Image (tube, helix red, strand yellow):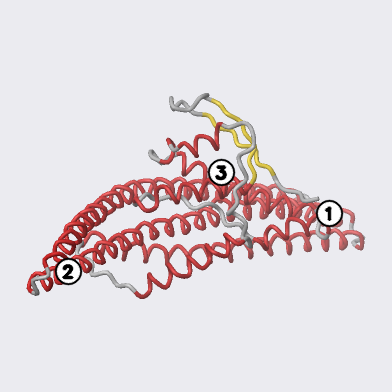
Amino acid sequence: MSSYLVYRVVTRTNIRFFSKQEMVVTRRFSDFLGLHTKLMEKYLHKGRIVPPAPDKNLVGTTKLVISQQVTGEANTADFVEKRRWALERYLNRTASHPILQADPDFREFLELESELPRATNTSAISGAGVLRLFNRVGETVNKMTFKMEEADSWFEEKTQQIEALDAQLRRLQSSTEALALQRKELAQTTSTFAKSAALLSTCEEHENFAKALVQLSELEEKIQGIHMEQVHADFFLLCEFLKDYIGLIGAVKDTFHERVKAYQTWQHAQGMLVKKRESAEKLDSAGRTERAGSARDDVLEWEVKVERAREEFEAISRTIKQEFDRFELSRIKDFKHAFISYLEALLESQQKLVKQWEDYAIQVKQIE
């Protein structure tokens, strides 16, 4: 018998095309991945920035089971909370997109009270998953080998900007993870110190000083809790936010690559058109009128394909520019909100620490 987590999704909206203003459904993690796959198939090739779904981490999923048997409920709760936050950010980001929010599959995800049809391509180790892995490898090789001669300075500038932003955010996220880890180690050391102070108080003959040591132990236990609260803020308010945006930047890069693919299609069509024209001209010169007529039909067909490919390339270029402008506005707003929330949590933590030490200082000064 297999077990799995179910997430309760509560939606409140005043958008008219939803059937209700408040909806409550339950969804499995695979349902979120299935939704993301559908949105990618519909909108990525058009140049839309589709928010990335949280990764299906096999290591994390395994820890979820093992932790219940070995390390208790703490790690399980931590894993579930991290994933819940990631899924909530994914839904909110998708819902804020003016095109994606109206998508029938997204609306069904939020509205359908019964279970969704099981997605068949979300397993990380399924045959479809292996096929997607090879496709991604092929896409990566294609990105590395094909160099597009960029004629639009806007795209050249934004490509450099997004690459630099990605690199710097990855460095910042790595530093933030190290900060959270060090603060967690500080909390653990503080707890050890508190226990040592408590043990020392049992050996102290001076009653008032022994009492002060007991109070110091209690103080350090409180400080340990404050440090852990800040670790939570380090992770959820900053580290996970940065990780989320690194994934979103990856989605932006995906749209840029779709434009390159559209350009390749256009160039391929132009190359085929040149070949068809040369073939028709040779047949005309040779007086082979019957085959020349068929060749001219091929030329007309490829002229249409070239024009269609050119229009699709220009259309995706326009869409990406619109999407990027919307991304930039949201990015500034999101970063401002995230940093303010983090600074407020940091200030609150420091104020609590100062208050605890001030109260203890008053008690120590009273020792006679």
Q: Are marks 2 and 3 in contact (CB under 8 Å)?
A: no
Q: Is residue 90 left or right of residue 358?
A: left
Q: Between 220 and 118, which is closer to the camera in this rendering?
A: 118
For marks 1 and 3, the one nearer the N-term is 3
Disc number placed over residue 214 in the picture, else none: 1
Q: Do the residues labelled 2 and 1 touch (CB within 8 Å)?
A: no
Q: Which secondary structure lies at badge 2?
A: helix
Q: Which residue is drawn at 49% across and 57% down?
A: 242
Percent position (x, y) of residue 110? 55, 35
Q: Residue at x 57, y 65 (%)?
A: 130
Percent position (x, y) of residue 366? 77, 49
Q: CA–CA distance between discs 1 and 3?
A: 43 Å
Which mark's residue is nearer the viewer, 1 or 3?
A: 3
Percent position (x, y) of residue 260? 31, 63
Percent position (x, y) of residue 11? 55, 32
Q: Which secondary structure lies at badge 1?
A: helix
For marks 2 and 3, the one nearer the N-term is 3
Q: Name the residue under label 2.
A: 274
The image quadrant that residue 148 belongs to is: bottom left
Instruction: Mark 1: give few (<14), some (14-19) or many (20+) Cα within 10 Å.
Output: many
